[in-house]
Image (cartoon, rainbow, N blue to C red):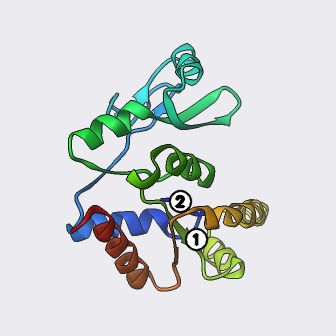
């Protein structure tokens, strides 16, 4: 599942999990940063060294990865997804739009890609402003990034416009249930 920041993707995922009709589990990302207090290797992240991360990139071991900040990597290991799916788990990835496209390309019909969209860019701006957590400059940056990210929406199997949260949750949950054959 992918969406520009502020579109409600994480809220939709949590709501579906809370409903209990789909037993989804989040994938555990890998990172080369150090664990923060209380974080557990294999639960919060797979903590690996920069050398291990770079070797995994060279060995094509990632479904997707990004250098989020200079020298700071995050990504989803193929084995994380494949092992969990082979164990019968439904794995949900809450990732950026480029990563979502790469996951779909890699797993094809074995993956359902869902893009959560705002009703409009203007509404997205209002939502971000309503949070009251960011400067006007940061909001402008997020909105500009969202406009770029929205260009990826046609590459997804399904697009859900989050103009009514309950409706968006129901629509997304139904698509997932249909996909897994329930």
Element type at mark 1: helix
> Mark 1 or 2 closer to N-term?
2
Image quadrant for the C terminus?
A: bottom left
Element type at mark 2: loop
27 and 159: which one is in front?
A: 159
Height in image: 76 above or below 98?
above
Height in image: 161 above or below 10?
below
Q: Give left or right: position of 159 versus 13.
A: right
Rendered residue at 42%/55% (across/down): 109
Q: Give left or right: position of 117 versus 113.
A: right
Question: At which x and y percent is residue 174?
Answer: 32, 75
Q: Which residue is mark 1?
A: 131
Q: Which mark is residue 2?
A: 2
| Residue occupying the far top of the picture | 51
Q: Residues within 10 Å of mark 2 (few under 14, many from 20)?
A: many
How far separated are the C-alphas under marks 1 and 2? 20 Å
Rendered residue at 41%/69% (across/down): 12
Rendered residue at 28%/69% (across/down): 177
Q: Which mark is residue 116?
A: none
Q: Of the residues tagged 1 and 2, which is closer to the observer?
A: 2
Height in image: 175 above or below 137?
below
Q: Residues within 10 Å of mark 1 (few under 14, many from 20)?
A: few
Rendered residue at 34%/28% (across/down): 41
Height in image: 153 above or below 34?
below
């Amino acid at each position: 599942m992918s969406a520009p920041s502020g579109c409600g993707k994480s809220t939709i995922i949590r709501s579906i999990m809370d409903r209990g009709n789909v037993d989804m589990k989040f994938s555990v990302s890998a990172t080369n940063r150090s664990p923060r207090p209380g974080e557990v290797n294999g639960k919060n992240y797979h903590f690996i060294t920069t050398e291990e991360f770079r070797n995994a990139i060279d060995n094509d071991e990632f479904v997707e990865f990004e250098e989020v900040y200079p020298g700071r990597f995050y990504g989803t290991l193929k084995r994380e997804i494949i092992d969990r799916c082979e164990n019968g788990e439904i794995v949900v990835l809450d990732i950026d739009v480029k990563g979502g496209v790469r996951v779909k390309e890699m797993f094809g019909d074995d993956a359902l890609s869902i893009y959560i969209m705002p009703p409009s860019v203007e509404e997205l701006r209002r939502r971000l402003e309503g949070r009251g957590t960011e400067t006007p400059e940061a909001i402008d940056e997020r909105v500009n990034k969202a406009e770029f990210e929205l260009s990826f929406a046609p590459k997804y199997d399904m697009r859900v416009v989050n103009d009514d949260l309950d409706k968006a949750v129901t629509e997304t949950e139904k698509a997932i249930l249909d996909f897994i054959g329930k």
